[in-house]
Image (cartoon, rainbow, N blue to C red):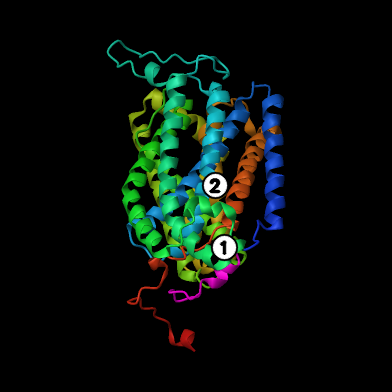
Amino acid sequence: MSSHHDTDVNPVIDAIAGRSLPGSANVASLAMIGIGVAAFATGLFAMGDHGAVAWGAFLVGLLWTLAVSQGGILFAIIQTGTWGRWGRPVKRIAESFAFFLPVAWVLLLVFLVLGLKIYAWNPSTIIEGGAVSLEPHSAEAIRSKPIWLTPMFFMGRQLLGVGLLIALDFVYLRASLKPDLILAAQRLGDKAPGWWKSITGGSTDVTGALKSGLATQARMVPFIAIAYALIFSLVAFDLMMSLSPWWYSNMFGAWTFVSSFWLSLATLGFVAMVGRDWLKIGPFLKTNVTHDIGKLMLAGSMFWAYTAFAQLLPIWYTDMPEETDFLLVRAYLPEWAWLTQSVAILCFLAPFTILLSRGIKKMRWPFAGICALVMFGMFAERTLIVQPSIFFGDPRTNFVWLFTTTGTWLGFVGLWIQVVGRALAQLPPLVLTDPYLETHPWDVHVHSADAAH
């Protein structure tokens, strides 16, 4: 089979046959899941807080994996909407993240059914001090919080909103996958995974599937982009901000959904670097790809810091008690100040400084390292938002708290590796039929005389 691309894609297709999750990744991820289960159980029964810390750690893991998984689709639609070529070699890797989304929806359901008692506005809260009154502080205030923050309404809008976003994602994903699976199945024959037929429907028309697929992907771009911004803002306001029901920040939604995409970029860079040889995509994954991902990550660290400061500044100068307590606990109490300082280093100072280097963005393992740093930094950031609202002890001296929070997150990461890794093992790791995978004929690459020799 011949390819219309500059580089032959046939070796990439041939590598699919019999490929599975690498043994080291399989063992490591299963061990992480085991640690996660043990950590969550420890938090449920050993903290003495009726499971509040455990369910808070569960929420952090859920938010982290949901952000990574949805961010992969957002990366793909950005490539589609901008006609971008530079990111096409990793577009399929990004799309594979979406296979975790149905699992994330089920985990969200579990949390909403069993973990909703960590919210202080819940009449059945398990938080120390009991339920917080949501009645307005004055007769002139609008009575909105008691209506908005009711368990059934809360659960319904979260499940419906996230479910709608996932449905849109899979319409896009199917349109992207179908022509590639048809092409790969024609070469692999009986070696092609059987579940591909649920997407291809037995079709053999690559050209027709590609034409309709590209049109569908283009149509889905504005719907997914708008839905992502709105629904992830809702997730941020509901699942995180309402842990402190009288605190609010208008920019919190945008800060959260942009940083979620930033987290997915770091994960994409890490997976691409670590899995390059396993997926046989080395000839396509040139240094300009990681360089461009790195530049976006640099912009992400700057935007994270800018929007964080843009929230802090008006809260500082207005000095209103309902706004300042959230920040005072995290920034000035010794129990949490260390974590705030760590987050500032992990999410801004370190990535901003390191990613200023052009060379590091082009070096495989150093770039994977900075991606891992951002991934861990975002776990610390989400933990900083969630845990001080439900844990009132000193985390610095509480090993059970540390094991519960970190171990539960590792369990979610291990589960994500299992799901996404097994899906990626059976998928074409490149967008095989996408015309934008091919280098544009007008592209000009300038090299120094020494490099030419």
Residue in view at x 55 percent, y 34 percent: 106
Whole-number angstrom distance, CA of label 1 to CA of label 2: 19 Å
Task: Return the x and y of residue 169 as percentages of the image width and height.
Answer: 43, 46
| Residue 427 figure quarter | bottom right
Q: Which residue is mark 2?
A: 377
Q: Main secondary structure of the magenta part?
A: loop
Image: 163 above or below 436: above
Task: Give me the disc on residue 76.
Answer: none
389 inside magenta stretch: no
Task: Return the x and y of residue 124 as percentages of the image width and height.
Answer: 54, 15
Q: Which residues are magenta?
A: 1-16
Of 182 and 347, the residue lying toward us: 182
Mark 1 or mark 2: which comes first in sequence?
1
How packed is label 2: few (under 14 Cα within 10 Å), some, or many (20 or more)?
many
Tag count in the figure? Answer: 2
6 inside magenta stretch: yes
Q: Work out which residue is located at the far top of the displayed protein and give it.
A: 139
Q: Which residue is mark 1?
A: 273
Q: Are marks 1 and 2 in contact (CB under 8 Å)?
A: no
What amino acid is at disc 2?
Gly
How packed is label 1: few (under 14 Cα within 10 Å), some, or many (20 or more)?
many
Q: Disc 1 on helix, strand or loop?
A: helix
